[in-house]
Image: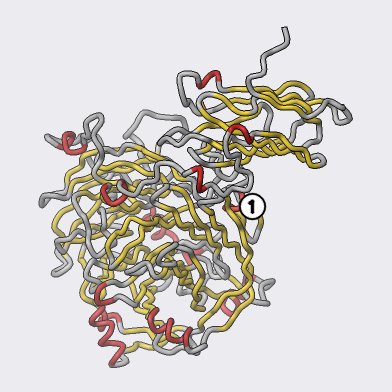
Amino acid sequence: MIGLAMALTVFHSCKPKGVQSAVSGDSAVKAYVPPGKYDEFYNFVSGGFSGQMSVYGLPSGRLFRVIPVFSVDPEKGYGYSEESKPMLNTSHGFIPWDDLHHPALSVTDGIHDGRWAFGNANNTPRIARIDLKTFRTAEIIEIPNSGGNHSSPFVTENTEYVVAGTRFSVPMGDKVDVPISTYKENFRGTVSFISVNKESGRLGIAFQILLPGINFDLARAGKGKSHGWFFFSCYNSERANTLLEVNASQKDKDFVMAVNWKKAEEYVKAGKGMKKSVKYAHNVYNESTHTATSTIENEVLVLDPKDCPDMVYFMPCPKSPHGCDTDPSGEYIVGSGKLAAVIPVFSFTKIQEAIQSKNFEGDYEGIPVLKYDAVLHGEVKKPGLGPLHTEFDANGNAYTSFFVSSEIVKWRLSDLQVLDRVPTYYSIGHLCVPGGPTKKPWGKYVIAYNKITKDRYLPTGPELTQSAQLYSIDGDKMKLLLDFPTIGEPHYGEAIPAELLVKNSTKIYKLEDNKNPYLTAGEKNARVERKGNEVHVYMTSIRSHFNPDNIEGIKLNDVVYFHVTNLEQDWDVPHGFAVKGANNAELLIMPGETQTLLWRPDKIGVHPMYCTDFCSALHQEMQGYIRVSPAGSNIPLTFSTGKTTKE
Ligand code: RUQ
Ligand code: CUA
């Protein structure tokens, strides 16, 4: 039981001293962005169990947008419109929610290129690609042979791959209905390399690597000199299947796994991969049809390290490693054992030497284990309690978050000396230095993404707001500048200079490029068509009316599709659309876009519909009526706009 007692004590986080301490001196000025002025950075922050990603400005902490990714969003009609529903399709069918932990921004030559953000779904393993021109989810791919997709998504130096490691090992293949107690013999883990098309960004699972049944926690790509390698933290090398808080904390050391993915590519080329039959959904949003399609794929290529020597190595890492971060040069790999008293820093050069000279302490399930001392650059001594994650600045410094002691600790990579520490309020998880995971950190700030905010804000019932904190790292000492509440759990975030995105931001969808099959090209084409009990309303919206806005001849048991085309060609003029009693969300239609709302009228009568987004001085006038008659009625189908009422 010692293990349990220890685990429990360690995981109780501490409230830092001086919780009430306010920002000092000129700090407020540093976070102040005057009205009408733009922020310097965008901060893309995952929403954890909200399944979404939100976008804040830095240094102000102002919230700009919540990007729906894995969860439906009635505000935007995401997952409710017919066009967007396929985005949330999976091999289990439509899933309205997931748990998004880590955003990752695309890079070219290891530097932010401002093209895409990626996010992971933990629960039903998926990776999403978000287009940074539109701030919309463009693609979602499901990952087979995986459970808990936590170690994900992380990108290689030129976004060749976005990589995902399974958190849960699971039985796979033909033998999946097995007793859980046969974990050691039947459960296996995988890591997946998902290729990203250079031009379109289109995703495809290039290959998976089959691994022993351990848990993969986090990962980072090598870069610079370690480009071509990938590093994953692993826990539960005990391979326990119950009460992991005790049973997966037995061993003194777990592993960081090093994967030579260039080597893996050679094995794929040489035909060493096995095709495994699986089932996974691949969903793509088409920008010209404004419609998502979902395809079920049936095969994945799997490499087994047994057949592929020199591809995978393990390095011992103290006590349940969590974060696994590579520094801007690619030389250092920082493991953070959440139960460890030191931070081990591995050296890529030494890893290569140890591999060359076969300096192994043995093997784990057939995979060579390198000697700890042989690959270690050194340990940061007495850094704090419960190290989780590390980010870097451009000056050779590292910033590590400490969950238990609630602080950020700055230390130097070269000599591993601790330079500074600041409390967070409190129980920080991830942290972010703008560009911190890239070859070119932009620096300036570190943001703490915290788990607890007691004492920081006005109470809001049993659950308090989630929150992040901004610190300046310009000087020798880190300085608290700002607290800012967040949407969902601010699990992790990446920040990118605003100028990299602003110039490419989409303003409208061009009507002439609209290839939606239900487009209504101009008001003169507005119409209503019946096909059996299906009614298709080809509707337009423009300030400040719908065409048609009076419809009669709809009957009970009809299935009505409102295909609404927003004819506006001006920036920031969406129109909304909602019908009384629809078991659905609104549509929010961008300029030049067509979106479809499905309505099954369930009551006889006249049903109001209206525009939900305040679009002009006469927005409140943007409304209409739909008459629903009994199933057998012979009221003809008619529609109009601007026909005056009978006196
Ligand atoms: S993990 S709090 Cu889900 Cu990113 Cu470390
Ligand atoms: Cu259109 Cu309000």
Foreground pick, 69 / 575: 575
Residue 4 visible from this viewpoint: yes
Residue 350's x, y, as percent? 24, 82
- Which residue matches tag 1? 94
Where on the image, by quarter, is ligand 1?
A: bottom left
Residue 574's x, y, as percent? 48, 34
Residue 599's x, y, as percent? 70, 36
Which residue is painted at 21% across and 70% down in the image?
A: 329
Element carrying mark 1: strand
- The answer to whether 247 is drawn above or below residue 444 in the figure is below
- The answer to whether 467 is drawn above or below residue 131 in the figure is above
Foreground pick, 250 / 553: 553
- In the rendered picture of this protein, how many numbered marks are placed on residues? 1
Foreground pick, 36 / 426: 36
Left/right placement of residue 431 relative to residue 580 reads left
Residue 108's x, y, as percent? 31, 65
Residue located farthest toward the front when viewing the structure as drawn: 524
What colour scheme does the image use? Answer: secondary structure
